[in-house]
Image (cartoon, helix red, strand yellow):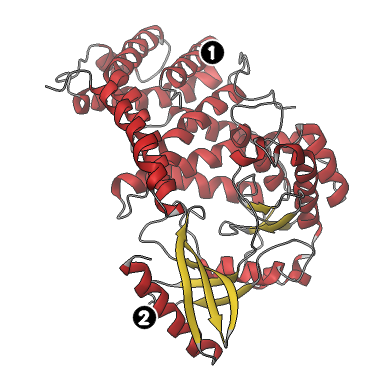
Amino acid sequence: MIPNPSKALVDLAMKLSTGVLPEIGSPYAAANAGMTAVLLIMLSQDSERAIANRMNDIDELKALFADAAAFPDRVGLASFVDAEPDSLLLADVDRLHADGMRLLIDLHAWAESHDAGLDQEIWAFLGRHADRNRFDV
Amino acid sequence: MSAVLDTLGERFAAYLTKSWKQPATTLHIEQIPGGASRETYRVRVSIGGQEQGLILRRDPVSSLIDTERSLEYRTYEAVFPTSIPVPEPLLLEEDAVHLERPFSVMREIGGCESSAQSLAAPPYQTMRETIGRRKWEILGQLASLDLSELGVDAFMAVPDDPARRELEHWSKVIADDALHPQPIAEAARRWLERNLPEPSGRFALVHGDYRSGNFLYDEEGVIRGVLDWEMAHIGDPLEDLAWSLDPLWSWPERELAGSLLPREQAIGIWEQASGITVDRDAFRWWQVFASYKGLAIWISSTEDFVNGASKEPILAVAGWLMSDRQNRILVDRLNPRSDHAYAEPIV
């Protein structure tokens, strides 16, 4: 087991930026090294939160779907509300998250013309979703 | 030089010798960053005993934007004689036999910077207003050029409805390339479909990626070359203006568009140079479209990095970092109760 992998990724990014990049002569290779360091930091941030963020989204989607009583295609929403990921492996969480986002797209399209309150709730969700996946680099 | 670059330099010199019927020798060749849609090399050559600086742009194994090289090259040829500063196009070679992939050659414009980040640091920081004025003046001039005189209508389609065509194009890119459902992009697409502007009837050569980072500037604040015309097309000139003002290009500094000028000042300069008064209703649409198109490009970059042959870091930076920012911009623009943390209200 790697202890604290997100910190390890940041440490490696710093090593690349300060210990390797200044020694590179080619501007193209130096630019690539700099971008790779940035990507390592982004991977560090995302690896730490990826499952938690998707599970937060899934929980919020379930709450949104449970409130969407007037939506004509209730079956898909109801099925999602009862669903759980097959495991906490990222690939399994991702699969359920994708299912929820697909349902959200249909629900949002409907809400735009039928339910202004729900439309606003969905926009608020999308704002939280975007904010919790932000990168600070 | 590495062995790979040595070989490329030798083959390039052989090609120049044959094309220009003069003995050519590569004195120095180095790959340079930028120009993400093509591999870009700075080359010093001796041609008939005279030293010259050239820029070699070769098709990559995989690209940030899928583009047509001959369209880009012919656009450079069309624009070069005008008041719009661009590098002089010298050669287009579509036969992969010479350098393994097709390529084009431009004359180098030396002594310049292109980085958008450098605009905020010495020695260029004090030249920002000068550069900004020129940036939107050039864009306004581009909007005023006659398409037939330019000759671009000979190789570019003139759309009946530029806004609809662009929306359909970039919607297909998202539909084809998204690796995960995109509820923000989808909400933006629906908004754009609901609010499509009437065609203005005004057609211009649209650069397609006119922003800080895509032009060469010097320490006197002179813009000496507009680069990266690979997304050029005939369309509504408001498209370029909106793209140039997207908050992404000044992130996180909201006050100065493109890190250069206040937005309204930039719009005023563009209006004066183009002779066009911005239709604010239509412009609202083009601003949302600019962020949507950006997101489409970043989604496509992500797909390219994951599934493509190239593992260039620029594809992942564009795909991951820019998607994050562009998503936040779009939510800010379209959420009726936005607090506008990332994008100004569209007026």
Q: Which image quarter holds the C terminus of chain B?
A: top right
Residue at the (57%, 86%) spot, across then down: B49
| C-alpha span from label 2 to label 1 | 57 Å
Within-10-Å neighbours for mark 2: few <14, some 14–19, many 20+? few
Chain under numbered label 2: B
Q: Which mark is residue B154?
A: none
Check the image and report above or below for A54 versus B84. Answer: above
Is residue B202 visible to the viewer in this orientation of the structure?
no
Q: Decide which of B146, A15 is in the foreground and name it.
A: A15
Left or right position of B70 against B98? right
Mark 1 is surrounded, within 10 Å at the Cα level, by few (under 14), some (14 to 19) or many (20 or more) other residues, namely: some
Residue B2 image position (x, y, % from top left): 34, 65
Q: Nearer the viewer, mark 2 or mark 1?
A: 2
Name the one closer to the observer, B325 or B48: B48
Task: Determine whether, in the image, residue A60 is placed left or right of residue B33.
Answer: left
Image spot of residue B315 (x, y percent) = 40, 46
Q: Residue drawn 82% across and 35% down?
A: B265
In the image: residue B57, left or right of residue B132: left
Q: Which mark is residue A120?
A: 1
Q: Given the image, on which type of amino acid does mark 1 rest?
A: Gln
Residue A42, image x and y in percent?
37, 29
Relative to B194, does residue B155 appear above or below in the rendering? below
Mark 1 residue element? helix
Name which residue type carries label 2. Val
Find residue B235 and report its horizontal and vertical position in percent.
68, 54
Res A41 → quadrant: top left
Q: Chain of mark 1?
A: A
> Label 2, on which residue?
B97
Residue A69 vs B159, above or below: the answer is above
Q: Quadrant of residue B270?
A: top right
Q: Is residue A29 visible?
A: yes
